[in-house]
Amino acid sequence: MSKIDEVKAGVAAGKTKVVPGLVQEALNEGQAATAILEAMVEAMGVVGDKFSSGEIFVPEMLVAGKAMQKGVEVLKPVLAGEGSVSLGKCIIGTVAGDLHDIGKNLVALMIGSAGFDVIDLGVDVTKEKFIETIKANPDVKVVACSALLTTTMPAMKETVEAIKASGLTGFKVLVGGAPITPEFASSIGADAYARDAGGAAVKAKELV
C-alpha cells in the first residue's frame, strides 16, 4: 500500500491521530502536497457516498472530516510554499430559519481544503447578511447556500433570488442540502447544485 493510499484509508477511517503522521511520511517520501490533498478529498468523497447511502452516519462523517482537517494542517505550510494560488473567496452559510451546521461545516472544510478562502457566516443567515458580505468582499467567487429542512427551502429561494436581483456580479451561487434537488436549484436561479461536501468542493472549483 503506497503512503498516499494509507493517507486515504486513514482519512476514510477517521484516524485523526494517525493521519498527520502519514501525511508527513508521504511528504518525506517526495509525494506532492497537491497529490496528497487530492487523495484526502477523494477519501471524503467516498465517505460522503457512504453517508448518502446510509452505510455510515453523521458521527463517522465528522470524524473523517476532522482527520482530513488534521492532514490539511500538515500540508498548509507546504502548499503555501509551493505557491498554490488561492482559488478566491467562498462565502458560505445555512439560510434563515435553519440551524443545521454539520453538513455546512463539512462543505466549508472541503471547499477550504480545495483552495478557497472560506468566509463562514454560520447558520440562520438572512438574505441581507449574504448580500452585505458579498458587498464587503467584491472579489468573492462562490456563494454557497445550505438548507437542511424542507421548511427552509423557501428561504433558500428568497436568498438566491435576492442575491441575483442585487445587481452584484462576478461570482456563482452554489446550493445544496438534504431536501435540495438539481431541479429545485435551477428553478430558483442557482448556478450550481452539489449533493454532498465532496461534490461541493469539485463543483466550486468548476465554477471558477
Image (spheres, rainbow, N blue to C red):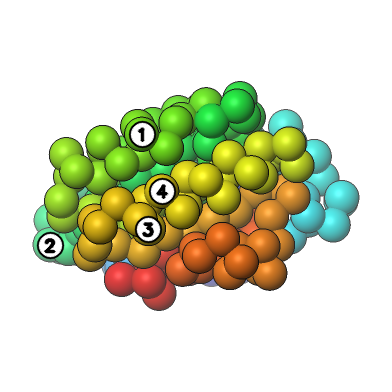
- Determine the CA span between mark 2 and mark 4: 36 Å
Looking at the rendered structure, the secondary structure element under dot 3 is helix
Q: Nearer the viewer, mark 2 or mark 1?
A: 1
- Determine the CA span between mark 1 and mark 4: 8 Å
Q: Looking at the image, which is closer to me, 75 or 57?
A: 57
Q: Amino acid at mark 3?
A: Lys
Give the residue number, with chain letter if any, for mark 2. Answer: 83
> Mark 2 or mark 1: which comes first in sequence?
2
Quarter holding the C terminus?
bottom left
User: Could you tell me which residue is drawn at 66 percent across and 68 percent down?
Assistant: 182
Asked whether the beta carbons under mark 4 and mark 3 sit within 8 Å of each other, the answer is: yes
- Determine the CA span between mark 2 and mark 3: 34 Å
Q: Residue 164, which numbered label? A: 3
Q: Residues within 10 Å of mark 2 (few under 14, many from 20)?
A: few
Which residue, as the protein is rendered here, is positioned at the far right? 54
Give the residue number, with chain letter if any, for mark 4. Answer: 162
Give the residue number, with chain letter if any, for mark 1. Answer: 128
User: Could you tell me which residue is drawn at 80 percent across and 39 percent down?
Assistant: 57
Q: Nearer the viewer, mark 2 or mark 3?
A: 3
Q: Amino acid at mark 4?
A: Ala
Q: Is residue 119 above or below residue 122?
A: below
> Mark 2 or mark 3: which comes first in sequence?
2
